[in-house]
Image (cartoon, helix red, strand yellow):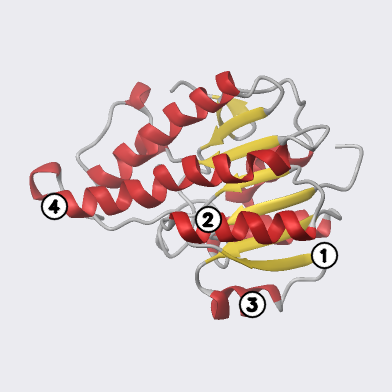
Amino acid sequence: MNFSPTILITGAYKGIGLEVVRQLAARGARVILAARKEEAAIKALSGIQGDVHFLPLDVSSPASIAAAAGILAGLMDRLDVLVNNAAILLDDGEGVLDLDGDVALKTFATNTVGPLRVTQAFHALLAKSKAPRVINVSSGAGQLAEGLQDWAPAYSMSKTALNALTQHFAAGLPHFAVNCVSPGWVRTDMGGAAAPLSVEQGADTIVWLALDAPQSLTGQFLRERKPIAW
């Protein structure tokens, strides 16, 4: 982008999301960290230099999403980039025969319906940008082309659905750049210590899509800055 963008990222008080905030702020962007854990988010932001702000937002709560959108609309004249990063993993180590339906519903509420509602709620602000972008943080666990494994089925299916949602938004918002990203297996609380990638590596494609990718790139699933099969 050839201007200083305003970027909102959900659930970014740790891990890949926080590294994305750090890199974006270092590049001169105004960054809004939106999360439900206010104390953790403010503490995380205290260690970052730049134009960074906190916005209370629980992506699983329609009331919280509406309130956050209203707050931001009262403070800013536009939003340039939305990064739907917030996600939960509740069924690590479980197979589909062990999956509790309530766990599946809770997972989808955050990982899939959350990005749907958040994008809808912030659409009006995004539409005021000259180069609006939506980035959905997905996972290789939801990649159908590679064949789904019987691991964390609720999480995996929620990411497959998020990929489909990305395509729907790309089709429905032709003037936006809407893409999803597989960061890879990254050393975070979710990824574990055995993961081969650092948070810096995991954040790279998200930051690239937010600031450097061509606006014409849309409706894609990416890893390492390149489109991959769905």
Of label 2 and label 4, which has the lower sequence position? 2
**Residue 78 picture location, percent across and down:** 79, 46
Image quadrant where residue 173 sits: top right
> What is the distance, in whole Å, between disc 2 and disc 4 at their CAs?
27 Å
Horizontal and vertical percent position of residue 154: 26, 45
| Residue at position x 59%, y 31% in the image | 179
Residue 183 pos. (x, y %)? 53, 43
Q: Which residue is mark 2?
A: 65
Q: Nearer the viewer, mark 2 or mark 3?
A: 2
Residue kind at label 1, given as amino acid type: Asp
- Residue indicated by mark 4: 100
Among the two numbered marks 1 and 3 on one chain, the one whose residue lies closer to the N terminus: 3
Q: Nearer the viewer, mark 2 or mark 1?
A: 2
Task: Please tell me which residue lies in front, 179 or 70.
Answer: 70
Amino acid type shown at disc 4: Asp
Assess disc 4: are there few (<14), some (14-19) or many (≥20) residues with their C-alpha within 10 Å of its C-alpha.
Answer: few
Q: Which residue is mark 1?
A: 51
Q: Residue at x 23, y 48 (%)?
A: 104
Residue drawn at x 76%, y 66% is 52
Q: Nearer the viewer, mark 2 or mark 4?
A: 2
Pick out the residue farthest to the left.
Answer: 97
Element at badge 1? loop
Q: Secondary structure at mark 4?
A: loop
Q: Mark 3 — residue?
A: 42
The percent coordinates of residue 2 (x first, y second) are: 91, 37
Kind of residue at disc 3: Ile
Name the foreground residue: 11 vs 140.
Answer: 11
For the N terminus, which image quadrant? Answer: top right
Q: Of the residues shown, which amino acid type is indicated by label 2?
A: Ile
